[in-house]
Image: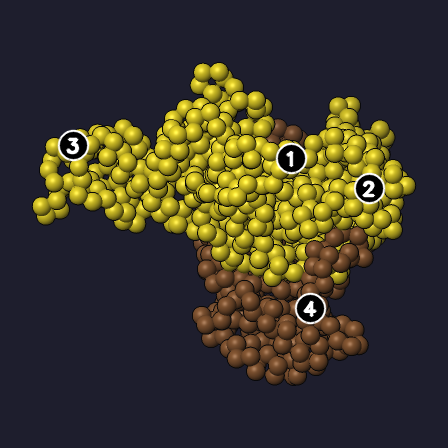
Chain colours: A yellow, B brown
Amino acid sequence: MNRYPLWKYVILAIALLVGVIYTLPNLFGEAPAVQVSSGKATVKIDPSMATRVEEILAKAGLKPDFVQFENNSVKARFADLDAQSKAKEALTAALNPDPNDPTYIVALNLLSRSPRWLTALHALPMYLGLDLRGGVHFLMQVDMKAALTKKADSTTGDVRTLLRDKNIRHTGITRSGDGIVVRFRDQATLTAAKSLLAEQLTDFNWVESLDGADYKLAGTLKPEAIKRVQEAAITQNITTLHNRVNELGVAEPVIQQQGADRVVVQLPGVQDTAKAKDIIGRTATLEMRMVDESTEGRMAATGAGPVPFGSERYTERGGIPLIVKRQVLLTGENLTDAQPGFDGQTQEPAVHLTVDARGARIMRDVSRENIGKRMAILLFEKGKGEVVTAPVIRGELGNRFQISGQMTTAEANDTALLLRAGSLAAPMEIIEERTIGPSLGAENIDKGFHSVIYGFCAIAAFMCAYYLLFGVISTLSLAFNLLLLVALLSMLQATLTLPGIAAVALALGMAIDANVLVNERIREELRAGANPQVAINHGYERAWATILDSNVTTLIAGLALLAFGSGPVRGFAIVHCLGIMTSMFSAVMFSRGLVNLWYGRQKRLKSVSIGQVWKPGASVPAKG
Amino acid sequence: MEFFRIRRDIPFMRHALVFNVISMLTFLAAVFFLATRGLHFSIEFTGGNVIEVAYAKSADVPKIRSTVEAMNLGDVLVQNFGSSRDVMIRVPVRADVKQGELTARVFAALCRAENGSVKTVEGAATTTGASSASRQVCDTASGEPLRLSRSEVVGPQVGKELAQDGAKALAFVIIGIMVYLAFRFEWKFSVAAIVANLHDVIIILGFFAFFQWEFSLSVLAAVLAVLGYSVNESVVIFDRIRESFRRYRKMNTHEVIDHAITSTISRTIITHGSTQMMVLSMLIFGGPTLHYFAIALTIGILFGIYSSVFVAAAIAMWLGVKREDLVKSPVKDHDPNDPNAGAVV
């Protein structure tokens, strides 16, 4: 009865193998590395950069372990710190000829020392939280009310233009809060305006009312539109933050949305909050200007003449110089949206732009006069401008127009992102800030690690002494539990924090419960006079219901923490919940497997090694 | 080795009244301290600034205190944290002080008190090889007298939300466990288990109020984990009670409960002992960050044993659990593997 079918052993073996493979990367530690990433929003890194880095390093006589392209950056790993710093110097010198205007960011980083075949299996070490590696953490609140107000503001202009175009006379358009109020003299114009606005501005609900002698039409944002505006605001803010944070040269920044209106920014390794805040709070601006296509301008672009008066020289993506007039037609404030998409007729990838009413009026005037000429869209960051794109105007433009032609879908996406990235969609405020020194982080790792190890040893020693062979089996299954838990966390690429390590320790302390339940049950069966094989079988079977019950209640607490916890508590909760799952598997299936393997084959089993089973004398009254 | 050599069932329930009175008194004391002293919430809940500074030599806490108090920041707390060289400074939220700049100001003041000046070191590579963009360093002729090891700024609104979320999580755990137990056992057990374990929670909080230990987010996590964990204990005993009701038809409720507790007592002590070993290891090696977390767990585990053995079952008894509550359908009661099974009456 104590035999497992082969498939159960196969499952256990697979679980063990997977556990070992995914736990391994955590054991290799980290090696110094150099990371090259883009320093400008307009520069994108592609796999060819890896070969370039290899060439530069080869020229400098440095031999990296490997150079790889991953997640928009190129990383090269080195054997020691000395090679790392030399490589950084070599790469900085070669990639950034102008130190005041770096195109690429060359940052020092750490990479897992694990062999490449593990990395190829996506077996990566756990990501260490800020409290373990040191750095800055910001929690920022996006002012959603401002985003809605901005939307209402831009729509107010749209309403004005729409009504003027259709010759509908109104007595005033005002914004009240997130809504818009339009006043009319009589009912007829109001009805006409209402049908027009309801058709054109579908994001708003239009309600008419009478206010004294005025006929009033009030527009409020529809709930789904509010949601859309808020989502757009937060994604745009995150994109913008990414661009700004890039400048800090942080190896692996974390910028994530938290909840509906918050953004978490974590910058490992950074210690200077003042500088970080300064950069995060900086604004980049977008400007649209005409390209100077006069003879002098063309001359200047090829380098054959001076830049004409009233024009400036900028570089396009890819480094081609472009002479652009100084006069600013539109700024990023007039641009309400930029989305990648496809041209309606040619099906070419395109970027669809939407400008507000004021922008539309200017666009129309400018485009009418300049058909066939080029208009440049410039992005200013750190006081330096760069041409994002410079399309040719093909016709008269309205408030919605597109840039298309000779673009891949990826380029259209990038351009749309860049156009939106100019500024924050809504202001943000730092509501939580944390800095952890790097030495404190290293100390925390040691402390957490020691707690787990010593606690584990104490439990193991006790179990082995008290339950003998069954104690050894319990210890093995506890170790298996730890292995699975670490493997699972590595697989999920969960962020390990100190509370997370505490949760690992606690999970182990609690997981032993299931083993104790089983062992005590077996002893009890033996005490009642059952033969060993039956005792083992009943012990496991009867303990199972109890183990399940008790784990479910613990899991409820874990889920509550997961649902309502934030930050460090969430990390604790994730590990806690996973620990409960793995402990059920390891304590029941794995330890049973070991017991079956050891005792299952012995037909006439006389005794099991589970420590002394003390039997009370005849004084106990018979029961049952 | 066998620790528990119990000849006959221990009559726990005979003294149930005494234990319940003891529980009640501890509980009331806890409530009293919670009400009069209140919890010493960490800045995660209240909002404010925490600055941890590591000194090169043993820190002069009174001097630091007077330096910070001279800045007029309100109710500032200065204390050693971990070792004698580490100092933690807590500053509450004040409407007239800009929170974001406070850390830098305090650091600069402390630095000046050591005759140093703050300057920014750019792009210094750390020993670990990871890059650090730049950091504020307190510079004197004789090296670096102090370093900023950790700082935390929490806005007041975050704190309010955290407290709300904590309350929600607690409510969720209580309701979830009650529903589950009512479904698995009987409402009387679910009430008994939750009362017994809330009594643990209140007592943990009572300890934190009495000693004015810092109640942080991780302590809250520990409290909730303990709640889930010590309900375990009650569940194991209830499981046994149900089983004993089925097996020993001649025993009355009283005896059944005694038998259930006696037969699980060794498991209770061993399990909790093992968990406690782990927690103790955290308490000893985990450092100051995990200190209160481990303390909350320790109290929770100790009172968890007490409450499930002496309180939960007793409450279930007062509520009047009967055999009929648990042994409902005779069909389920019939064990096909039972060799003694015969005709069912």
Of tags 2 and 3, the one toward the viewer is: 3
Q: Is residue A140 left or right of residue B64?
A: left
- The dot on residue B337 is none
- The dot on residue A77 is 2
Please, what is the three-letter code of the amino acid marked with disc 4?
Lys
Residue bearing mark 1:
A304
Please, what is the three-letter code of the amino acid marked with disc 2?
Arg
Front one among B307 and A590? A590
3D distance between C-alphas at marks 4 and 3: 67 Å
Chain to which the residue tagged by mark 4 belongs: B
| First in sequence: mark 2 vs mark 1 | 2
Residue at mark 1 shares a chain with residue at mark 4: no
Residue at mark 2 shares a chain with residue at mark 4: no
Give the structural element (helix, strand or loop) at label 3.
Answer: helix
Q: Quadrant of residue A610?
A: top right
Residue shown at the point (60%, 73%) measured from the top left:
B106
Residue shown at the point (65%, 80%) measured from the top left:
B64
Asked whether the residues under the numbered discs 2 and 4 touch, taking CB atoms below 8 Å apart as contact, a structural biologist would say no
Please, what is the three-letter code of the amino acid marked with disc 1?
Ala
Of tags 2 and 4, the one toward the viewer is: 4
Residue at mark 2 shares a chain with residue at mark 1: yes
3D distance between C-alphas at marks 2 and 3: 70 Å
Residue bearing mark 3:
A191
